Image: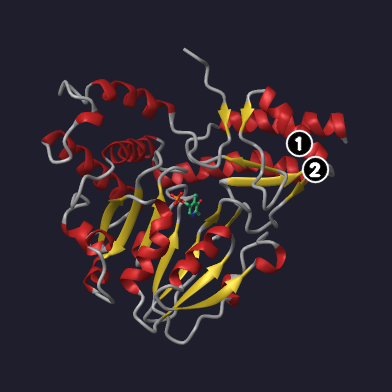
Amino acid sequence: MTERIYNFSAGPAVLPEPVLEQAREDLWSLGDSGVGILEHSHRGGPFDAVIEAAEADCRSLAGVGDDHAVLFLQGGASTQFFMLPANLLPEGGTADYVNTGSWSKKAIKEAKLYGNVHVAGSSEDENFSYIPDLASLSCSDSPTYLHFTSNNTIFGTQFPSEPTPPAGAFLACDGSSDAFSRPIDLTRYGVYYAGAQKNLGPSGVTLVVIRRDLLERKERELPTMLRYATHAEQGSRYNTPPTFGIYLMGRVFRWIQDQGGLELLGKQNEEKAALLYDVLDESAFYEAAAKAGTRSLMNVTFRTPSPELDAQFVKESEAAGLSGLKGHRSVGGMRASIYNAFPRQGCQVLAEFMKDFAQRNG
Ligand SMILES: *Cc1c(COP(=O)(O)O)cnc(C)c1O
């Protein structure tokens, strides 16, 4: 079989190897059922067990109790950009957003289709290279919710902790690129959503954790499929759900438990990122694209002294078996995406490559 290389892709991204090995077996036959996971009915007993385990493991990892529903939906995080305001932002109501990058902007654009948007804080003035100070956020008088993007995949910044919404408002979060990468208290959130393909599984399934009392609100008529309540009432099986994605997300939750849970995984993620930030901080050659203090543990963005050297870095790293390091076009330079499943050894190899490259070209 072909050797696997170090995959720094921003998403879809690397998955845990034990999960892939298990999936390879379950593709052929899920347990001893004689039917592969892709071929099982979403209403049969074997899949009941799969979705129940995925939900139970999600709940136990993040301490989610009965006050919240756990949903497995389709359409990616991008569908949540409009599903959230469509369901929960009243006509004429206001939602507050923290604008920390491209994904926040897309979320804001969709919310404006349904109500007013107040930008409670922004880092656009410095090309989103930092997270605004949480104490300096200025919320509107009585917003329905306060939305933030916990990790900014493109720019490489991450909220150190969640902001606090004003009294009466609920907290909403796009956690796509740092979901379950460190301890999180989901009971503080009204709506938490994450496309799976960075930290939790394959593309095609989106995790939504929503406070149950919000399911009773009905701000406008919506197609059945677009209502959170539909999916909550039907256990994410109103129609055919993304069965394989749910299966794989469940395996990833189980793998996180095997790592010792979010506390230990969070420590591992800190150590992995430190291997790279230490090189950046000690080097006069590289420049970190994000400001210290709110740098991301998931997406490490950096530059060499010139675009020509950036291009050479990408080319040479690719040849050395380090794939996917080219930065997003809006930031330039390089981006190392080192999500939950990315191995520590890959960070060590990249750190050595960076030092060597700087020595040869500095
Ligand atoms: C990747 C990403 C998205 C887009 O997710 P889709 O599942 O492709 O819609 C949204 N928000 C963040 C923070 C992301 O990293």
Which residue type carries mark 1? Ala
> Which residue corresponds to the image point at 53% horizontal and 55% vertical from the top-left?
151
- Classify residue 286 as left or right of residue 338: right
Badge 2 amino acid = Pro
Dots 1, 2 in contact, CB < 8 A: yes
Is residue 3 positioned above or below 57 on the image? above
Residue placed most toward the observer, 285 or 236:
236
Tell me which residue sits at (80%, 43%) in the image.
307
Label 1, secondary structure: give it.
helix
User: Which sits in the foreground, 186 or 138?
Assistant: 138
Q: Position of residue 261 (x, y in %)?
A: 39, 43
Give the SS element for disc 2.
Answer: helix
Which residue is identified by label 1? 311
Q: Give me the C-alpha separation between circle 1 and circle 2.
A: 6 Å
Residue 122 position, x and y percent, is 61, 70
Spot occupied by residue 55 in the image (x, y as percentages of width and height): 25, 47
Residue at (18, 37) in percent of width and height: 47
Label 2 C-beta lies within 8 Å of the nearest ligand 1 atom: no
Q: Is residue 318 left or right of residue 217?
A: right
Describe residue 141's horizontal placement relative to residue 329 as left or right: left
Numbered label tally: 2
> Label 2, on which residue?
307
**Residue 91, position as x, y percentages in the image:** 35, 81
Residue closer to the observer: 47 or 227: 227
Side (left or right) of 127 relative to 159: right
Q: Residue furthest top?
A: 1
> Is residue 138 visible to the viewer in this orientation of the structure?
yes
Please say if 103 is above or below 315: below
Give the camera-side residue of 152 and 270. Answer: 152
Q: Quadrant of residue 132?
A: bottom right
Rendered-image quadrant of the C terminus: top right
